[in-house]
Image (spheres, rainbow, N blue to C red):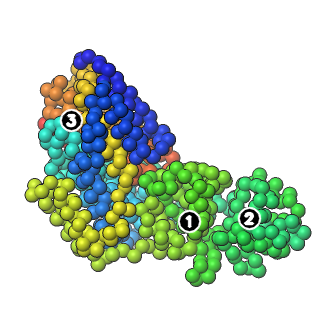
Amino acid sequence: MPPVTTGMVVVFAIIVLALVLFVVEPVPIDIIAIGLIVALVVFEPWTGITPADGLSGFSSTATITVLAMFVLSEGVRQTGVVKLIGDRIVGVTGDSPRKQLAAIVGLSGSTAGFINNTPVVAIMIPMATDIARRTGTSPSRLLMPLSFASMMGGMLTLIGTSTNILASDVSARLLDRPFSMFEFTLLGFVVLVVGSVYLLVVAPYLIPERIKAEEELTEEFAMTEYLTEVVVRGDSPLVGRTVEEALGELDMDLDIVQVIRHGEPFIEPLARKEVQEGDVLMVRTGRDVLIRLLARPGLDLLPTTMHDEDLETGGEETARQLAEVVVTPDASIVGATLDEINFGDRYDATVLAIRRGGAIRRERMGQRPLRGGDTLLLQATEDTVTRLDRRREFVVVEALTRTQYRTGKLPIAIGIIAGVVAVAALDIYPIVISALAGIVAMVATGCVRPSEVYDAVDWNVIFLLAGVIPLGIALEGTGGAALIAAGVVQSAELFSPIVVLGIFYLVTALLTNVISNNASVVLMIPVAVDAAAQIDANAFAFVLAVTFAASTAFMTPVGYQTNLMVYAPGGYTFADFFRVGAPLQLLLAVVTTLGIAFFWGL
């Protein structure tokens, strides 16, 4: 056991603080990553991280390659290839839930090996939801398997996930052995097949129907209990006041969604519209506030049962309809409230409810900070929904019209991706160079417009990579990795190398379920390499175990970005992910460990 040094203690303290911040996330993860760089450089006498080392993450081939892959994935996404395939699924599967599930799992798993799995899931969420509604299946049955399959599919190739690319970079630094393009494709295929069988055979009995099949959105979000129509009598003090003044006069926790006058509905902007006798106000509020509201003079309750069509109003060009929109984890509005960003005016839409997992919020929504994965029930025009659908910050679950994809560019985009893969696989140029060349080709051919290049990149991931890379260097350089490895080996000295390999898989998987998968790779690979050296085992096999485990965060919705994206649209709870994901995690721990031992040896 190596002696504990001051440098180790300082680095361990920074790591613990980083882990806490990644879990609690008081500020966005890109800010946390920048803070890591600052802390490591400030404590240079103990961490050994110079300013050049601290900034090395920005120039890392892993960071640049991941950035390039986001743009390449955007080029393929813009062609609508996944949607084109998905549109044919209903015709093939009919009303069979099992066939639908098989098609969703097969499509997401196979596609995620060549397109980053996050945009794959973003494209397929509305497709899966549409299939569910058209065939009377609960969306809950399809969305979680969609996320899980995309994670497993990401292990088919080097470019399937950012985690693989980062792990390859760390492996090259520690072992002088980066991953080739198809380094672990065979094992990835085994994992995908075994995991898919589980999703098709076992998971349907474990996934509850959190969202009932063929529910209207007003029923799904239980809006009937919170949307009420109130008639304004002539003796009401609200008559002659604007809606904004009326809300100030009432001073209650309610919103006026629309005003109906002589059968004609008026919607946003309502603030300056004057209330008249006989107006019907559609208000959103809870039961207690409603009772207080009706106690005010001049207001009568209009009994009604709310349906979707009651909120889908207006003429042909100004028609407002209902739509579900998911806030992606890397959206700029995450952490802000609806009031702070003036959501209604900024996006020309009215937010009727917010669903976070299985919980639905309808009161004081303007003061609730938004989180990645939140689903907003919007009343908006077709133009607004189309604009939201084109932004990477949102996933429109149930849209009025879908984005106009560049289907004519499909062969070109697929050819560019094939070229990038071929050049890297044949070792003509490194993957980072072929990927950058792919960006140039995507823009030159019109698959991606120049204005879309920067929007295509998930900058949270880029800054996270830049921040955790020097953290891994510090952990290795101070001897902290060797100390942890010695402790693991000492506690497992009675076990064979294959059992120790399995332990590293499970520890990494558990860590990944609560923090970023990229952070897990950077922290665990140096430890795994040192542990392998101490038991005279194949260090590369241990690197692979950590890499596979870091991309299989099935047990929590926050463990992986795609889980968070399906969390609210599926109406899931935290317990749902553990119930379905824990057995799959254990199953793949055994399959992956045995597979690594078989293909690479120990």
Q: Nearer the viewer, mark 2 or mark 3?
A: 2
| Image quadrant in which you'd find residue 150 | bottom left
Q: Would residue 485 be visible to someone looking at this image?
A: no
Q: Amino acid at mark 3?
A: Phe
Residue 244 numbered tag: 2
Q: Amino acid at mark 1?
A: Arg
Q: Which residue is mark 3?
A: 542
Q: Closer to the N terminus: mark 2 or mark 3? A: 2
In the image: residue 518, left or right of residue 569: left
Q: Which residue is mark 1?
A: 346
Q: Nearer the viewer, mark 3 or mark 1?
A: 1
Q: Which element is circle 2 on?
A: helix
Residue 109 drawn above or below residue 534: below
Please tell me which residue is depicted at 18% across the width and 36% down the height of the picture: 174
Residue 82 numbered tag: none
Q: Amino acid at mark 2?
A: Glu
| Image quadrant in which you'd find residue 18 | top left
